[in-house]
Image (tube, grey):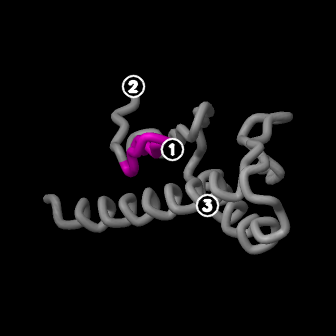
């Protein structure tokens, strides 16, 4: 049974983490996905790369940016604004996870 910790929660999305099974759950807009820790890191890198490569070459408000999802054949289809929201959401969740890991080092 997972004991999820909230790393990030907003109207448009959330990131949860289960320390017992090392799984992340990401809910963004109308999509909910589960990731291993390695796959979550891969998603962060992919989103950061997409911002550097695709963000400025797409029109605002039009879904033109594709991101691979963890299951075969599924992809996220995002606007520039949604990509930026996802980037900030994942970054904030990663910072919170790091803070929780550091705090856990002092719990005896």
Quickly name the residue at label 1.
24
Residue 84 is labelled as 3
**Residue displayed at 78% across by 49% down:** 62
Q: Do the numbered discs 1 and 3 sit on residues whose CB atoms are within 8 Å?
A: no
Quickly name the residue at label 2.
1
Q: Is residue 67 left or right of residue 102?
A: right
Camera-near label (1 vs 3) is 3
> Which residue lies most toward the top here?
1
Does dot 3 land on a helix, a strand or a loop?
helix
Q: Nearer the viewer, residue 91 or 21?
A: 91
Is the residue 69 above or below the residue 65 in the image? above
| Mark 3 residue crowding within 10 angstroms, few (<14) / some (14–19) / many (20+) | some
Q: Quadrant of the C terminus?
A: bottom left
Q: Is residue 7 left or right of residue 27?
A: left
| Mark 2 residue crowding within 10 angstroms, few (<14) / some (14–19) / many (20+) | few
**Residue displayed at 51% across by 44% down:** 24
Does dot 2 land on a helix, a strand or a loop?
loop
**Figure label count:** 3
**Residue displayed at 55% across by 52% down:** 37
Where residue 3 appears, as percent x and y from the top left, is 34, 34
Closer to the chain start, of discs 1 and 3, is: 1
Point out the stretch of residues depicted in magenta. 7-18
Residue 16 magenta-drawn?
A: yes
């Amino acid at each position: 049974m997972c004991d999820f910790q909230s790393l990030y929660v907003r109207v448009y999305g959330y990131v949860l983490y289960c320390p017992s099974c090392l799984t992340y759950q990401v809910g963004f807009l109308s999509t909910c996905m589960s990731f291993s820790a390695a796959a979550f890191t891969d998603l962060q890198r992919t989103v950061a790369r997409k911002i550097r490569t695709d963000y400025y070459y797409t029109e605002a408000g039009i879904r033109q940016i594709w991101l691979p999802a963890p299951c075969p054949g599924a992809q996220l289809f995002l606007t520039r604004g949604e990509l930026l929201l996802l980037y900030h959401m994942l970054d904030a969740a990663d910072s919170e996870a790091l803070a929780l890991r550091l705090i856990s080092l002092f719990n005896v």
